[in-house]
Image (tube, rainbow, N blue to C red):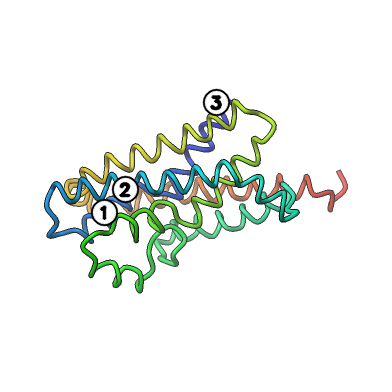
Amino acid sequence: MFETAIIAFTTFFATVGPLDVAAMFAVLTPNASVEARRSMALRGVLISAGILITFALIGDLILHNLGISLAALRVAGGILLLLIGIDMVFALNTGGTTTTEAETSEAAGKQDISVFPLATPLIAGPGTMGATILLMANSRDDMGAQVMVVAALLAVLLITLLLLLLSTAVHRVLGVTALNVVSRVFGVLLSALAVQFMFDGLAASGLFPA
């Protein structure tokens, strides 16, 4: 169960990217008051929490109704997370965990960014949604493990909220270089976890003899 919590926390921290989200938040709200930024940060995290917890609760039902096996989900989810990990390692911006250039441009003209792009796609992006479904499905027969997955998700969201409230200081103190270093480290870890997910999925698929 402890291993599940560590894997879930690492995966969510990498896919959400609290430091990157905080830096983007600071860039997109340069003229907002302290009260407005606090309000947007809180709303954004609460909305993203609602989205991700919904995926955690009904993700398995969706898979069942679509006839998607756990093995297929592990392989597909592993591929998605591997692509995100590669993006993080090479500091690319393809929209898996951050906004695209078009989305950033649109967000720059908004007074309230709590829903878009903060809640989604910055926090509850496709990578995090996919990771939530995958981790919950992996623990479908262990309620305690599923509780640990949700707890890890909430812990990462709490860290994200704290960093959003301190976003200006985070952006100023760490700078682009330090943020990229942290992102690359978690990108490597996420890539390794993604490959393991794919190996597990292929092993469970029955396509290859034991």
- How packed mark 2 is, by other alpha carbons closer than 10 Å (few <14, some 14-19, many 20 or more), is many
24 up-or-down from 196: above or below: below
- How packed mark 3 is, by other alpha carbons closer than 10 Å (few <14, some 14-19, many 20 or more), is few
Q: Nearer the viewer, residue 204 or 48?
A: 48
Do the residues bearing badges 1 and 2 touch, measured as CB atoms within 8 Å?
yes
Q: Where's the C terminus, which quadrant?
A: top right
Spot occupied by residue 156 in the image (x, y as percentages of width and height): 40, 39
Q: Secondary structure at mark 2?
A: helix
Is 18 on the left or on the right of 167, as rendered?
Answer: right
Q: Quadrant of residue 45?
A: top left
Q: Earlier in the sequence, mark 3 or mark 1?
A: 3
Q: Where's the N terminus, which quadrant?
A: top right
Q: Residue at x 33, y 43 (%)?
A: 160
Q: Quadrant of residue 4?
A: top right
- How packed mark 1 is, by other alpha carbons closer than 10 Å (few <14, some 14-19, many 20 or more), is many
Q: Residue at x 24, y 59 (%)?
A: 112
From the image, tell me which residue sits under label 3. Answer: 2
Residue found farthest to the right = 209
From the image, tell me which residue sits under label 2. Answer: 19
Q: CA distance from mark 2 to mark 3?
A: 25 Å
Q: Secondary structure at mark 3?
A: helix
Q: Earlier in the sequence, mark 2 or mark 3?
A: 3
Question: In the rendered structure, which amino acid carries the disc numbered 1?
Answer: Ala
Is 37 on the left or on the right of 55, as rendered?
Answer: left
Question: In the rendered structure, which amino acid carries the disc numbered 2?
Answer: Leu
Q: Residue at x 53, y 30 (%)?
A: 148
Spot occupied by residue 22 in the image (x, y as percentages of width and height): 28, 50
Q: Residue at x 65, y 39 (%)?
A: 138
Q: Which mark is residue 23?
A: 1
